[in-house]
Each structure stands twice: as structure tokens, then as C-alpha cells.
Image (cartoon, rainbow, N blue to C red):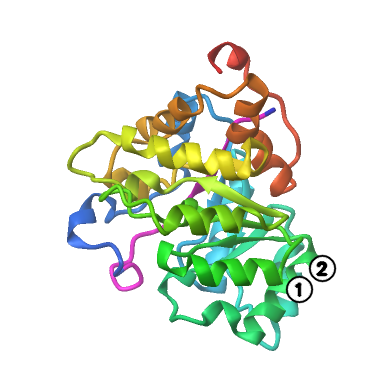
Amino acid sequence: MERIDSHQHFWVYDPEEMGWISDNMAVIRRDFLPGDLLPEIEKIRYDGCIAVQARQSLEENEFLLGLADRNSFIRGVVGWVDLAAADVEDQLEKFAANSKFVGVRHIVQGEPAGFLATSKFLTGIKKLADYDLAYDLLVRQHQLEEAITFCRELEGHRIVLDHIGKPNIKDEAWEPWASHFRELSEVSGLHCKLSGMSFEADWAKGDFRVIRPYVDHVLDCFGPDRCMIGSDWPVSLVAGEYYGTLMNIEECLSPLSRDEKWDVMGGTATRFYRLPSGKAVPGDSASI
């Protein structure tokens, strides 16, 4: 089994397109490309990653698939299509022809209330299964109630919740996130990424042991076979280095069995995104 970072990004920095990168995130105001990530992947002895869209454009798909075609460690691409468009099937057919195009994401966290219930958007989501594509659900904690209704409507579809629903870890807030999260986990087919947590914590403290109760709750609700580890690099760099971000999550997995750790660290992502199975690098089993 391969170790897979299930969530990271590449971009050529454009201040107009990427205005969401605020002054206190200046460390990521530059280009981030495969040559920047590969040494980090090798250092922590992961085998590959899933590149997730950062821009909502069809050009983003071409960009990421081009990188994936030239870099074998990019195992899959989660891109973007206009799911509410009349020609959504044409868009899906075009990109699904590339075996590394494994899913679609829309940045719902920036949309108004009620967006997930939009009929055209729901119709587009339901077409993903026809092209064997998954959906990454990106919402903030205040949108979880809406996400519950959305996921129930799509029960049985391959959907993964990004960044554990973005709870307010900085203030160690627990409810209503924990209750909504448990209810969400009861939807069959839904998975969860153990990612984005360092970004939601207190960057100044640099001590992310505070994520442990959140990780424990995620594992209790979903089980390791529906969870996958993700760095959210390079966004995570505002809070710490790549190695430390993933190791903090791995430390939270210490109570799990060897097989359960394998699920979270690669097995779940491989199954969910239907990646070609691979072999772990030599010596991996000794460090799990």
C-alpha cells in the first residue's frame, strides 16, 4: 500500500486571482510547483499525492493535469467544472478521459446559504457517478447543517468532506461542530479528510496537540476506513512545515492498529479515488 497525501495544491501565484491570500499569509505568496513538493514528499517517505484545485476555472484542470502527466508522484487531480452549467456533461467527458482526473470540487465555503440545495448544482453532482468521479465537499462549520441535507440527498455517491468541516480549533470550540459532524458521518458513502487542521489552529502557538480531540472525534465517527490524511500544502505553511504538519496528524493515529493506520495514510485515499494500487517504499512498515 502506498502512502498518499490526499490533499495539496499547486499554483503559479497571481495576486489578482489569489486575493484570498491575506497579508498574514505572505509566506505562500509565491509559486508552488511539483519541484517544491517532491523533496518534502520524499523526506517523510510518502509515495504520492492528490492535487486539488485552487482556482475555479477549466484552465485549472489543464494546468494540474499537465503537472500530473509530467510527475508520476501526482497520483490524481481533483479539478473543477461548472456543475450547474447546461454543458456540464461535455466538460466532465472531456476531463474524465484523463485517468488522473479523479474528482471535482467547488469552493462552497465562499458561497451564500442555500447554495448546496440549488437544483442545477445537485443535478450536476449526480452526473459525476456516470464518469466515475468523486466529489470533494469544502464547507465551513456553520455550513454543516446544510451539508447534512446535501449529503443525504446524495447518499451513496462518493463524497469526501475536506478539512473535517473547518471547526474553530483556534478557540477550541467544540459544539455545534461535534454534533453536526457525527450526524454527517452517518451518511453512507461519505468520507473525511484529516486535513486543514493546522490552518484552523493558533498559528502563533505552533503547538498543534490541540488537534488531537478533533482527530479522535473524526476517527470515532467515520472509522479509519473512511478517513484519509492530507497536508493542505502549501496553505499549511502559514502554520508550519510540511513534515511537521503530517507528523502531527500521524501522532494522533498512534492508538490505531497497523492496518487502520495504513487506511488513513493511503488505503482509504487509494480506494476512494480509485487510484492504481502500488507498493509501499522499503522499510515503511517499521515506521508505522
Quarter that holds the N terminus:
top right
Tags 1 and 2 touching, CB below 8 Å: yes
Separation of marks 1 and 2 at Cα, in angstroms: 5 Å
Q: Residue at x 54, y 47 (%)?
A: 193
Q: Nearer the viewer, residue 75 or 265?
A: 265
What secondary structure is marked by label 2? helix
Q: Which residue is mark 1?
A: 127
Q: Which residue is mark 2?
A: 130
> Can residue 65 be spotted in the picture?
no
**Residue 214 appears in which quarter of the rendering?**
top left
What secondary structure is marked by label 1? loop
Could you classify mark 2 by the number of other residues whose Cα lies within 10 Å: few (under 14), some (14-19), or many (20 or more)? few
Q: Nearer the viewer, residue 61 or 266?
A: 266
Task: Give the image location of residue 272, x and y in percent.
Answer: 70, 47
- Name the residue type under label 2: Asp
Q: Residue at x 59, y 38 (%)?
A: 73
**In the rendered image, the vertical position of residue 81 relative to residue 213, given as above or below:** below
> Can residue 156 be spotted in the picture?
yes
Task: Give the image location of residue 153, x and y in percent.
Answer: 70, 72
- Does the magenta-highlighted stretch encompass residue 203? no
For the stretch drawn in magenta, the main secondary structure is loop
- Magenta highlight range: 2-18
User: Residue 247, which numbered label?
Assistant: none
Q: Residue at x 51, y 82 (%)?
A: 114
Task: Give the image location of residue 66, x and y in percent.
Answer: 59, 56
- Does the magenta-highlighted stretch encompass residue 13? yes
Quarter that holds the C terminus:
top right
- Name the residue type under label 1: Lys
Task: Give the image location of residue 184, x and y in percent.
Answer: 59, 58
